[in-house]
Image: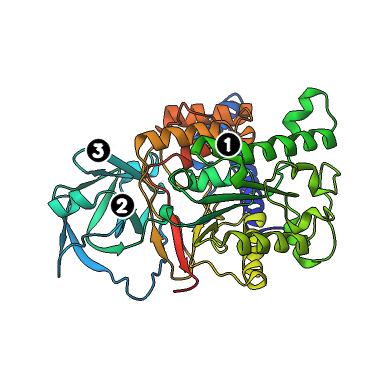
Amino acid sequence: METRKQLLLRRHRRHKRLFMFGALLVLVALDWFGSWSTTPVLLVLGWIAHEAWFADHLFYSPRDDYQYRFPTGVEPLPVRLVEGRIEAVTGSLPVGVDTLMLEVDIRCGWLGRWVDPHVLIDCGECTDRQDFERGVNGRRYINLSGAQAALAAGTLRLRGRFCRLAPGASLYAFSNPDYAKQKVLVIAPHADDAELAAFGLYSRCSDVHIVTLTQGEIEAQVYRRLGLDSAAAARLKGRLRSWSSLAVPLWGGVPATRCLQLGYYCLRLEAMEAEPERAFASLESGETDIRSVRRFNALALPGDLDGASSWRNLVGDLAALLARLQPDVVVVPHPQLDPHPDHIQASRALDQAIEQSGWTPSVQLLYANHLVDNDRWPMGPAGGGIALPPCIDPLPADALWSPVLCEQARLDKAQALAMQHDLQVPLSFKKRLRRTIQWLLAARRWPESGEDDFFRKAVRRHELFWVRRLSD
């Protein structure tokens, strides 16, 4: 079944092809009375302009307001921005909170249509940067987590570059326990999802387990260069990524005995739920027995008995883990925000496993490694903060937790990503050329730690979780 993101991307490409065909007809018409030699030059210049300024996948208008709702009890504090300082209109600024979000209208300047508009947050000791869409003109949410002391002291300063901030704003404050001190279970649909979303969290945990649902074996074309056919390449990729799911967390202090690889197959989870008793083979490797990558698991699970890649086994495995580990906190993809089919199904499998196991965690920490309508979020360069993502259609009213990663934690997280085989695939010539054009014309920058865009998107000043309470 075609996902909403795939549908939007296909529609975007169709519209782009129609636009380019129409532009070609206009160029030919304009050139009819001139020299034909100008048409190729104009086509090349048009393509360069497209790659520099119009190649982003943005499936909403930058003029749309974000539509966030928060739980009852999280009331907005009206504030004003006076020369970049935040002043409360009524009451006093919050103290003793861990997560702060500033709701403010942002309007880009004319340069903000060509260079990424961003807000600089000066805390005194450091300056954070949070980027927004080119052409932004609407309600956005700036992440001020980690700046509480500067805010209370009155030394926090906000400054827009290529954009302006409206003087009226609202401040949302969230108080959370340090979930790293509780018993945590991280659910990763694929190897690297745990590191992308929660390396900073799980590397601080004293009691954490990481379970990876799938082998990650599909799209293995790069391994065919080793002389393998498509099935053998997929099997090799599945083995490598399964190994990564067990070995890489050790870099964050989590031994392999606390990591489990369930071995199900990529992009099969949705079909598995539709027919829970049926076993589904891999789309590319041809394998049918999930036990091929389970031999290093420290715990025995129900799916080990027959090795069938079925929904019944997946839910049974998760239910057994919940009953045995009894975690207080489960970290799982956001079912409404992250559009990847396997990520959505991971959340659905967890819900069914909770019912089957009889154990209900107190809290789900939800993360989004992908978005349906903005491929660049978190926008801006690596190391900056994470502003809230686009929310054009209202989400469930969840609280937020956004812990701050120190410089050493960000360095360690970048190296954890560098150990992931799937994030080391060389860039295509087209992507490399596009980056060069954007570097020259749009002032975009990428980190030295790795070429994959996740090195830019995931290695940030913050990690961000939506807090969904299941029991009190």
Q: Residue 469 at x, y = what percent?
A: 46, 69
Instruction: Give, as a three-letter code, the residue at label 2.
Output: Ser
Q: Contact (CB < 8 A) between labels 3 and 2?
A: no
Is residue 382 shown left or right of residue 83?
A: right
- Judging depth in this view, the residue of 73 and 24 nearest the camera is 73
Residue 182, by quadrant, is bottom left
Q: Position of residue 397 (x, y in %)?
A: 44, 70
Q: How is the image coloured?
A: rainbow
Q: Is residue 82 in view? A: no
Count of labels in the image? 3
Judge from the rendering whether residue 281 lies leftward or rightward of residue 121; answer left or right. right
What residue does disc 1 label? 248
> What percent of the width, then of the height, locates residue 92?
15, 65
Q: Secondary structure at mark 1?
A: helix
Residue 145: give its label: 2
Query: Which quadrant does the C terminus fall into?
Result: bottom left
Relative to 419, residue 203 above or below? below
Identify the element where label 3 is drawn: loop
- Mark 1 surroundings within 10 Å by alpha-carbon count, few (fewer than 14), some (14 through 19), many (20 or more): many
User: In the picture shown, does residue 329 fall above or below 232?
Assistant: below
Residue beneath disc 3: 126
Crowdedness near tag 3: few (<14), some (14–19) or many (≥20) residues, C-alpha within 10 Å: few
Spatial CA distance of label 3 from label 2 is: 13 Å
